Amino acid sequence: MKQYSTTFATKFAAFAVAIFLAGGAFAAEPVKVETENTMMLFEREQSGAGERLYLRHFGPKIADEAGALALAVKRGPISSLGTDNPLAYSVFGESGRGLNRFGGLKVTHDDGTVTLDLIVEKIERDGGALKVRWRDAVHDFRVIQTFRPRADADVVETWVELVNGEKGAVRISRMSSFSLVFPMLANDWRLMSLTGEWASEGEVVDKPIERGRRIVLDSRSGVRDAWLNNPAFMLSIGGPSTETDGRVIGCALCWSGAWEMSFRRSEVDLLEVVGGPANVAGDYVLDSGKSITLPVAALTYSENGKGQVSRNFHRWARRHWMPNGAKERPTLLNNWEGTGLLFVENEIVTIMDGAKSVGVEMFVLDDGWFGLGERVRNTDDRGLGDWYVNKEKLPNGLAGLAAEAKKRGLKFGFWRSIPTGRFRRKAARCAADAAARRSFSTSPIRQCATRSGASLMRLILPFQTSRS
């Protein structure tokens, strides 16, 4: 199959090159961003309005760059209106132009106009990163997009900075971290995402993206970015993929606020993907002379199924995002699946014995250890914020369990949730910390992060507003 595809691609590329030469096409210049195993190949092309930048390839490294540029043909069938249908589009979506008709940006300029026509002003290298500077054809409004390869993880990070050089404020109704049309000819695209809420987190949804349809994923729940939908996805190209087989694009938006991603498959089977923070509270006002930097989106590609996408992201997070990501973590067990909220001290000690016998290095006491009187934490609708140890369950307190863990050579931690306003008294705000200091003043303690239905790892790049 690969040999046939290569032969077809070579013949088609030669055919496309002949057409372009015969038609007097402008000379094109390739620009690329590479990791160890993948490549993003762009093309700079002059047109009557100015220079454009097109994404021609995102996938495995290729030697025949000229062939890839030719294969990504620029024009498709004539529409019913008698106009050409482009098969490739500007890297960043302009409102009202081409396939990116949803666009990565929607702005109202200081003079009230709403059009945006982005022309490439400059393309430069910043270390290993590619930095593309666009300007609006009419207004002093600029978009700076960075593509930074993380070569050792086969991940490309991309983000956008918006700069207002106009005399007055600009109102931004939509601002995306990325707006790409993936240039892969495929007659089948499938979208995998995660949905769910508390106690049903991470439900897999895998569905086809039908031709001419648009799918939207979003979250409007403030800082709970993964409530209902997770800000990440995988795209299977050319049919369903498995853990070990298939072409897959993966993306994670590194933002913990409200967000939106949309997916639109064209009539010629290209796929437009737009994603970034969502303006749920209204337009963002960018004052004259100021700029705003949007969150990072991380992109990766695999020819070996979804499992490779996951491993790429794991390497990327450990090596480039997590503090001390290369540090070895202890093997951990908690008691939630075994006991839920109802347990007594002896049961917990027995679980510690079992954990030690199979090589576990750390034990974490889960939910249910706190709450007094009518607010005892025996059900999940009470007790949060009452950070006092329930001595009926734990007569020797947290310190007693920490001592038992230490006898067995286990590290010890306990679960604590962020309170949601259900306080028993004002002192409850700091009671857990005070209890920890009293109980563990002479004992080593490792308090674990809260167990959350949102995500195991929070990747945040806050908005940055600065003067240009």
Image (cartoon, helix red, strand yellow):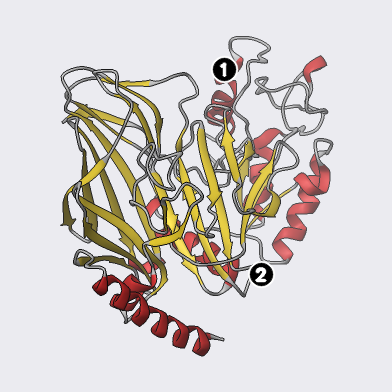
For label 1, the crowd category at 10 Å Cα-Cα, with few meaning under 14, some 14 to 19 and many 20 or more, is: some
For label 2, the crowd category at 10 Å Cα-Cα, with few meaning under 14, some 14 to 19 and many 20 or more, is: few
Q: Is residue 388 above or below residue 35?
A: above
Q: Nearer the viewer, mark 1 or mark 2?
A: 2
Between 351 and 269, the residue placed more toward the observer is 269
Look at the numbered disc 2 and give the secondary structure of its residue: loop
Q: Is residue 3 left or right of residue 109?
A: right
Is residue 98 among what the camera can see?
yes
Residue positioned most to the top: 425
Q: Which mark is residue 271?
A: none
Between 93 and 39, the residue placed more toward the observer is 93
Q: Which residue is mark 1?
A: 429
Task: Name the residue located 41 percent from the left edge and 40 percent from the top edge.
Answer: 103
The x, y position of residue 6, in whole percent, is 45, 85
Between 300 and 77, the residue placed more toward the observer is 77
Look at the numbered disc 1 and give the secondary structure of its residue: helix
Q: Which residue is mark 2?
A: 242
